[in-house]
Image (spheres, rainbow, N blue to C red):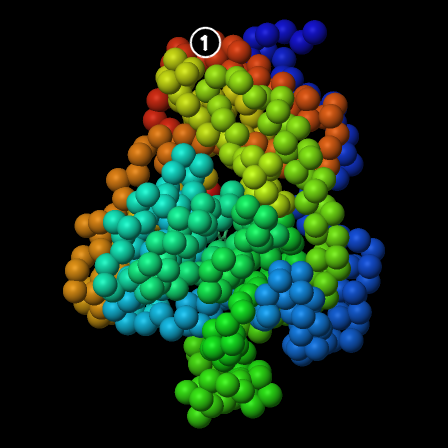
Amino acid sequence: MKNEKLAVLGGEPVISSGDISPEKRDSLFRAMVLTEEAKAAAMAVIESGNFSGTDITEQFEREFAAWQGTKYAVAYCNGTMSLTAAMFGIGLGEGDEIVCTTKTYWASVSQALNFGASAVFCNINDMLSMDPADLERCITPRTKAIMVVHYLAYPCDMDPIMEIARRHGLKVIEDVSHAQGGLYKGKKLGTFGDVAAMSLMSSKSLACGELGMLVTDDRTIYERAMAFGHYDRNNAKYITECEELKPYYHIALGGVKGRANQLCCAIGRDQLKHYDERCVEIRRAMNYFWDQLEGLPGIRAIRVDESTGSNMAGWYCPYGIYKPQELHGLSVKRFAEAVRAEIGGICYEGGNYCLHTHNFFKTFDLTHGGKPSRIAHNDRDVREDDPLCDPSLEKYCFSVPRFNYLDRDVIDLYAAGYRKVIEHHDQLLENDEKEAQGGHWYGSENQ
Ligand SMILES: Cc1ncc(COP(=O)(O)O)c(C=O)c1O
């Protein structure tokens, strides 16, 4: 029996370096798992030099659309570009407003400023997800669209969101980067809005390298999104119905090159074949992990009740909610530090910082127009409506391991690390640094 002094104070950790072999750690935690067939397909692209064509990409797009259940799928070089193309697809333009949840990665909405549009930020609920109750506050006659982000794989509450969107005549884009294949009440995420786009980069649950994908049933959005970044498919073969696009064949209308690298599409074709099966196993493992911690004070799982027909697909980037008031006010920072000492890393507080707190949305002048770009084409200062996010939502969450498969013995060990800190949290109350980190900006570790 290991002693009960917390490891962060010099006690013995729950997991010591020799307890889990490097091979087991790799198979349990590796984000991008590749079959031999995927590696062979990638090698075939390397050997043929067929990186820049579109034949493999188009095969992948067809398979992806069939899997997603949409008429069209268009691949891009990354998720950021696919989301940008979706904005162009719906016709986002100067003076428009687009509402997005504030706690997300910057590429969900920052590009709106490139179109002369204003990003308007919506509050999050206690699952760190778009709060439908705050949505109506964000809508004005200028609102063109809602960007719904299924953040940390948790499906947004699409019934009220779609009802509000339709009542106000708004377009809906879904950012499915964290939740490919996830379900809301039995229906696939990415099929609720007018268009969805997502990252398939190497750390995502559907990992294809550096890749993005846009899916839609809407022919106009499809053609516009294609013409935006695919100069080599902006022609009469692909752009057949949008009369307004036809005079502009052969140049990428966004002035950007968005074509996918076929190496990643070749990998993606094989990844897609195994994805649903892998997700089932990940969900078994993650639900088992959270079951072990159920009922403990101070923490709550971010997970859905799967009996409703919803699920968290590949459970990208799992987090828990932290309730310091149930642990005598212990800061999440100290809590996470103590868990890291018990299990050897993994547990960090915060998630993404809320976007509205960044100077990019307050003062940055992208086009040297003499005004912050976020309000350059708006007759009101949207910054005045920025969320007053409940600090407990901004600050009090923490990461947990994401297991690729159910290995009860190992998962029990990780759960024991969290449980030990909770049960002995009184040891940490002295000299606790109360100031929690609200999250992080990517790249900030390098200043
Ligand atoms: C929610 C979200 N949207 C968009 C992106 C951008 O995707 P990419 O990195 O593939 O450009 C990411 C991050 O990868 C993300 O986490």
Mark 1 CB near ligand 1 (8 Å cut): no
Q: Residue at x 79, y 59 (%)?
A: 39
Q: Is residue 138 placed above or below 340 in the rendered structure?
A: below
Q: Residue furthest bottom?
A: 247
Q: Quadrant of residue 364?
A: bottom left
Q: Position of residue 321 (x, y in %)?
A: 46, 30
Mark 1 Cα shell of 10 Å, populated few (<14), some (14-19), many (≥20):
few
Q: Mark 1: which amino acid?
A: Asp
| Helix, strand or loop for disc 1 | helix
Q: Residue at x 57, y 43 (%)?
A: 310
The residue wearing badge 1 is: 426
Q: Residue at x 67, y 9 (%)?
A: 2
Residue closer to the observer: 435 or 35: 35
Q: Position of residue 348 (x, y in %)?
A: 50, 32
Q: Residue at x 52, y 10 (%)?
A: 424
Residue closer to the observer: 389 or 208: 389
Residue closer to the observer: 29 or 6: 29
Q: Is residue 318 placed above or below 313 in the rendered structure?
A: above
Q: Position of residue 137 (x, y in %)?
A: 25, 49
Q: Is residue 156 left or right of residue 125?
A: right
Q: Is residue 127 visible?
A: yes
Q: Is residue 427 placed above or below 401 in the rendered structure?
A: above
Q: Is residue 236 left or right of residue 110?
A: right
Q: Quadrant of residue 439?
A: top left
Q: Position of residue 306 (x, y in %)?
A: 60, 37
Q: Is residue 109 visible?
A: no
Q: Is residue 255 left or right of residue 271?
A: left
Q: Is residue 82 placed above or below 444 in the rendered structure?
A: below
- Quarter of the figure with the N terminus: top right
- Quarter of the figure with the C terminus: top left
